[in-house]
Amino acid sequence: MLKIAVAGVAFIVLSASPIAHAQVASRGAAERLSAADVNALTDARVNIIKAALQLTPDQEKYWPTVENAIRQRAKDRQARLAGVVQTVGERSDSGPVEAMRDRNPVDFMHRRADALAQRSADLNKLADAWQPLYQTLTPDQKRRMGLLAIFVVRDMKDRAEQRRIASGDDTED
C-alpha cells in the first residue's frame, strides 16, 4: 500500500511540474517562480525520490552526496535561467527590428554551447553521485527508481518541447 501511495504522490508531483512550468512560461519573466518556490520544488522532489526508494540504514550514508548533487544541479539551472532573463531584458530595451538586426549568431552559439556544457557537467556530477548508492539498491528499489526516471525524462522532454515552441525554433541544432 505504501508503494502505491508513494508512486501516486510521485506521479502527481512530477506530472504537475510541466503544468506549472507552462503557466510560468506564459506569464513572462516578471512573474517567474521565486528562488524560494524553486527551493520548495527541489525539496519536494528530493523527498519524493528518497521516500520512493525507502533506503536502508546502510544505504543512507550515500544519500547526502546524491541530495547535494540534485540541489546543485537545480541551483545551476536557476543561475542559467537568470542569465537568460537578464540577456533578454537587456535586449528588450531596443525595438524588435533593432534586436534582430543587432543580434550576433556566433555569440548566441557560444552562449548555447556554454549552457550545454554546464548542463552536461551537472548531469555527470549527478550520475557520479548516484553510482555508489545505485550499486547498493535492491531490484525493487531499482525498479522504483526507473519509474521515477521515466517521469523525469518525460517532464524534461515536455519542457524542452514547450521552450522550442515558445521560441519559434522549428529547426534542429
Image (cartoon, rainbow, N blue to C red):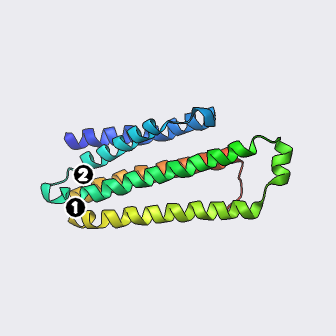
> What residue appears at the point 26 percent right and 49 percent down from the top-left corner?
50
Question: Is 61 displayed left or right of 169 in the figure?
Answer: left
- How many residues crowd mark 1 within 10 Å: few (<14), some (14–19), many (20+)? some
Q: Position of residue 66 (x, y in %)?
A: 31, 57
On residue 53, the disc is: 2
Task: Identify the residue under disc 1.
Answer: 137
Q: Which is more toward the observer, 88 or 5? A: 88
Spatial CA span between label 2 and label 1: 8 Å
Q: Position of residue 11 (x, y in %)?
A: 37, 41
Q: Amino acid at mark 2?
A: Leu
The reply to whether dot 2 and dot 1 touch (C-beta < 8 Å) is yes
> What residue appears at the point 45 percent right and 61 percent down from the top-left corner?
122
Q: Amino acid at mark 1?
A: Leu
In which quadrant of the rendered view does residue 116 lie?
A: bottom right
Question: Is 150 displayed left or right of 61 in the figure?
Answer: right
Q: Residue furthest left?
A: 57
Residue 137 seen by the camera: yes
Q: Position of residue 161 (x, y in %)?
A: 60, 49
Sequence-wise, the earlier of marks 2 and 1 is 2
Q: Which is more toward the observer, 171 or 32? A: 32
Tag 2 secondary structure: helix
User: How many discs mark residues in the rendered view?
Assistant: 2
Residue 161 seen by the camera: no
Question: Is 151 displayed left or right of 94 in the figure?
Answer: left
> What residue appears at the point 42 percent right and 66 percent down from the top-left corner?
124
On residue 68, the disc is: none
- How many residues crowd mark 2 within 10 Å: few (<14), some (14–19), many (20+)? many
